[in-house]
Structures are given as C-alpha cells and as structure tokens.
Image: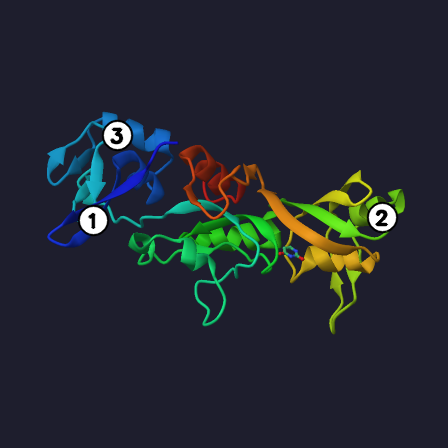
Amino acid sequence: MTCYYFEKIFNNATILFMRLDKMLANSGYGTRSEVRKLITRGLVCINGEVCKDAGQNVGDTDTVELDGAKCSSKEHLYFKFDKPDGVLTAMEDKRLPTIADFIPASLMTKKLSPVGRLDYHTTGLLIITNDGELSHRLTSPKYKIPKTYQITFEGQKITDDMVNTFAEGFTLDDMDTPVKLAPSTLVPVDDNHCLLTIKEGKTHQVRRMMAKFNRSVVELRRVSIGDIKVPEQKEGELIEMPSSEIEYLLKATGITK
Ligand code: URA
C-alpha cells in the first residue's frame, strides 16, 4: 500500500509530510483527480514556486497556495483499524487498554477519534479519523450507511420468521424507552453463525436485537462499513485508507458529489 504521509525530524521537531495532491484533497479542495488537474495547470505554488508535481511532498511548515490564495491544510487523516477483543473504543481510560494504545505517538496531536463505538468484546472494523463531519455522517441514521456484523450465537438456529421480522423492522423494548429499529438484513450462515447488516447504531444494538429472539451473542465482529472491509490479518494495526476509499466515504455521506 502507498504510504501517504511520513515524518522527518528537524531540530528535534517532527514534521509530517504528505503528497501535495493528498494534502489538497484532504483539505477539501476537490477529489484527488480534480486537484491533480489544478496542479498540472500550474495553479499551485509551494513556498512561492509553481509546482506541477502532484507527488511532491509538502510538510507542516510549507506554504501552499492555490490560484494565489493560501491553502489552509485541514489535514484530515483517515485510518482503518481491526479492533482486538478486550480494547475500549475510547482515547483514554485509567484502567483498561484503549484504541489510543495502538496509535503512534507522532499522530497523537492530530485529534484522531473513532467513528462510532464497538463494545469492549466486539472485534473488527473501526474507522479512525479527525474529519468530524464524516464521523458524524457515518454514524447518523440519516445517511443510512450499512454496517455488517458477523455473529456467533447460542440458541435455536435462525428461522425464516426471524429473517422477515428483521427485514420489516421491529421495536426493542428492553430498556426504559422503546426503540423502533429500521429494517435490517439477517443472513443465516449455519446453525450458530449469521451476518447482520444494520444502518443505524443504537447502544449494543446487535446484541439486543439477537437477545430479543432468545439468541445470545458469543462473538461479534464488524466486517464492513459500506464498501470498506475490515483489513485482513492486520489486527491492532492502524492502516491508512487509500484515497479511493476516502473518496467513496465522502461521496456515500454526501460530503462530495
Ligand atoms: N452492536 C453491538 O451490540 N455491539 C457492538 O459492539 C456493535 C454493534
């Protein structure tokens, strides 16, 4: 996979570098292909010099201008992470391991946070970013981004009735306030495994949905968010998202066209 940023140490200060096209796209100046066209047209200057090389690396201390106007780098960063069991989806905790333990020190100033929550014992895909708008939209039911979970459960095998009830939507009434759920897709795999795709994220939603039908979740793993799949064989590693995936997420949530 391409490495989009890297760091160098000058006079004991760590400077984060990134490709020019990536930096401009991340900062909201267009998609990668749109900003490449602007660069090729000679509209972009780095420290006062025209730069037509989209792959030129720019650092925190460089001044980038587009058509004469200084570009403010929002420096959005996007990562995928396969959360291990026994890790809190939080950036700090006094007692328990958190996902922050897996984030390199050089990125700790970047205001990264997880998109949504996985329970302490749930494993699988978490998106970690400092793009607050994307984070909000990915978790809001309004944008209907599907999240798919692989479930190992105890109890009777899944019935057709259960599949149909999930497809229609039902109400969870196990807490003080009843929660009406949107339709979801339940796919039996074998007698004690199934896949469930939901487009919202109520507290402990999957475990509660299964419990309502007397199935107890013994293992829960999120395998995808929209088209983004959990990285294979990379548990506990922070993986930079390729720009194709970032562009997909920005489009799927209506941030870009
Ligand atoms: N639903 C749950 O019950 N737990 C999770 O971690 C995610 C979805």
What x and y, as percent, mark residue 84?
54, 52
Question: Which residue is the site of mark 3?
Answer: 54
Neighbours of disc 1 within 10 Å: few (<14), some (14-19), many (20+): some
Q: Which residue is depicted at the point 44% across and 62% down?
A: 91
Q: Is residue 151 above or below residue 22?
A: below
> Are the residues flagged by discs 1 and 3 in contact, CB closer than 8 Å?
no
Q: Which residue is depicted at the point 48% across and 47% down?
A: 81
Q: Amino acid at mark 3?
A: Ala
Instruction: Tell me, for residue 162, which label it has, or none.
Output: 2
* Colouring of the image: rainbow
Q: Name the residue nearer the viewer: 174 or 33.
A: 174
**Whole-number angstrom distance, CA of label 1 to CA of label 3:** 19 Å
Dot 2 lies on which element? helix
What x and y, as percent, mark residue 227?
56, 36
Instruction: Tell me, for residue 91, which label it has, or none.
Output: none
What x and y, as percent, mark residue 15?
20, 49
Q: Which residue is depicted at the point 76% across and 43% down?
A: 193
Question: Which residue is the site of mark 1?
Answer: 15
Q: Is residue 81 left or right of residue 190?
A: left
What x and y, as percent, mark residue 115?
50, 54
**Whole-number angstrom distance, CA of label 2 to CA of label 3:** 52 Å
Q: Is mark 1 within 8 Å of ligand 1?
A: no
Q: Amino acid at mark 1?
A: Ile
Q: Name the residue nearer the viewer: 82 or 47.
A: 82
> Which of the marked residues, 1 or 3, is nearer the chain's N terminus?
1
**Whole-number angstrom distance, CA of label 1 to CA of label 2:** 54 Å
Q: Is residue 79 above or below residue 53?
A: below
Dot 1 lies on which element? strand
Neighbours of disc 2 within 10 Å: few (<14), some (14-19), many (20+): some
Which image quarter is the N terminus in? top left
> Which of the marked residues, 2 or 3, is nearer the chain's N terminus?
3
